[in-house]
Structure formats: C-alpha cells, structure tokens
Amino acid sequence: MNTEPALLTDTEVLMAGFGGQGTLLAGKVLAQASMELGRAVSWLPSYGPEMRGGTANVIVCIASRPIGSPLIERPRALIVMNLPSLEKFAPKVKPGGVIIVNQSLIDRDPQRDDCRVIKVPSRELAEEAGSARAANFVMLGAYIGATDTVPEDAIERAIAVEFEGDKEKFVAPSVAAFRAGVEAGRQSTH
C-alpha cells in the first residue's frame, strides 16, 4: 500500500513572466516535487534569447500515467508574473481553471469569469518572508494553497534540493516565501 499522499488530479500549469523572475525555477521545483511523489512529469521551458528581462514561460504537466505531449495549448492553471504574460496566456486557460496573478506588477483583471482568479501581492509577501527575489515561490505557494495539487512538504523538500551546497542560504527565505503564498492561496478559497 502506498502511504505517500497522492495528487488530487492530473494537471497542466503554465508559469509565465519576464526572464529573471524565477518562473522556470518555480516550474522546476513543482516538477521535481511531483516526480518525487512518483508522478509522470514534463517540464518544458520557453524563453527568448535575451533571457533576463525578456519573456520566459514553462509548462509543467503532472499525470498519473505517461504524458503524450508536453505541449499544452489550454492549461488548467496559469501562474502569471507580468502584464504581457497575462494578456497573452489568460485567454488560453481552460474554463474552470485557476489563474494566479502577481498583483505587485499587474493592476488589470484577466477578464475571465469562468476561471478562479487569485490576486497575490507576491513582492510584498516575499519581502516580508526575507527575500524580494522569492516572489516566484510566493506565487507557486499561492497555487498550491488554492489547489492542493502537490503536498506542501514535497515542494519544500524540492526547494531544499534546488539550493543545496553553496546556495543553501536561499532555502529558508524561499521556503518562508512559499509558505506565505500557500496562506494567501488558502485564504482565497474561503
């Protein structure tokens, strides 16, 4: 009998923003945590040649069986860090999906009454947690808090693995930012 907590559903998550905002890293952490739980996972990054300041997005697919294609036209969830990404990707989210909006940089509504929209002041919560650079983990936390897609401790373990060695100083503020996001995501469901 498997005693590991199971994911509630198979899903696809698109994370998008400017290069340097950590969307690819947050996607990698989500994929790693899901893989550690024995799920089939794909992680498909896309970014412009300019990287920092250019556009960057990643699609993470999590499934109970092998994934046929990592390319997803209509994801079930969107985590969006900037306005250009909101405008480009919000119309593509499946009806009934969830859109996590970085309220620190986006002052516009995604105009989707068929999706759950959660606005998160990611920069402010990241600063309170000890690192303004951890806004990506606030956003990932809000998604997990709102959906319970992956157990929180699995994400926290994946963050610790990502920052092993000489980057270990980033673990505590990243986990604190993730936890602040989880709380923001949970509050949005009540």
Image (cartoon, grey):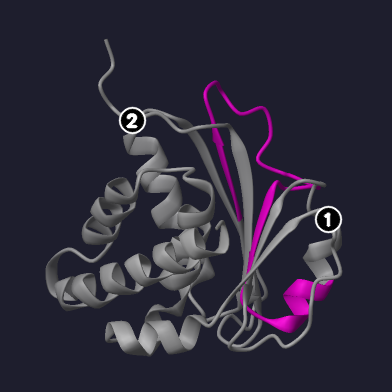
Q: Is residue 44 left or right of residue 151?
A: right
Q: Which mark is residue 125?
A: none
Look at 27% across and 67% down and name the residue there.
Answer: 175
Going from N to C along the chain, the mark reached first, 2 or 1, is 2
- Distance from disc 2 to disc 1, alpha carbons, whole Å, reads 30 Å
Residue stretch rendered in magenta on the structure: 59-87
Could you say whether the residue bearing mark 1 is in a helix, strand or loop? helix
Q: Quadrant of residue 150?
A: top left
Measured as percent of width and height from the top left, residue 116 is found at: 71, 57
Percent position of residue 101, x then y: 64, 73
Q: Is 165 placed above or below 42 here? A: below
Q: Is residue 38 above or below residue 107?
A: above
Identify residue type, mark 2.
Pro
Number of numbered tags placed on the structure image: 2
Determine the image quadrant of residue 7: top left
Name the residue: 58% across, 32% down: 10
Q: Is residue 46 visible to the viewer in this orientation of the structure? A: no
Q: Residue at x 41, y 62 (%)?
A: 182
Query: Mark 2 — residue?
Result: 5
The residue carrying pointer 1 sits among few (fewer than 14), some (14 to 19) or many (20 or more) residues within 10 Å by Cα, namely: some
Quadrant of the drawing holding the C terminus: bottom right
Q: Is residue 66 visible?
A: yes
Image location of residue 94, percent across then percent down: 80, 47
| Label 2 crowd bin: few (<14), some (14–19), many (20+), radius 10 Å | few
Q: Does residue 85 appear to the left or right of 121 in the view shown?
A: right
Looking at the rendered image, the disc whose residue lies closer to the viewer, 2 or 1, is 2
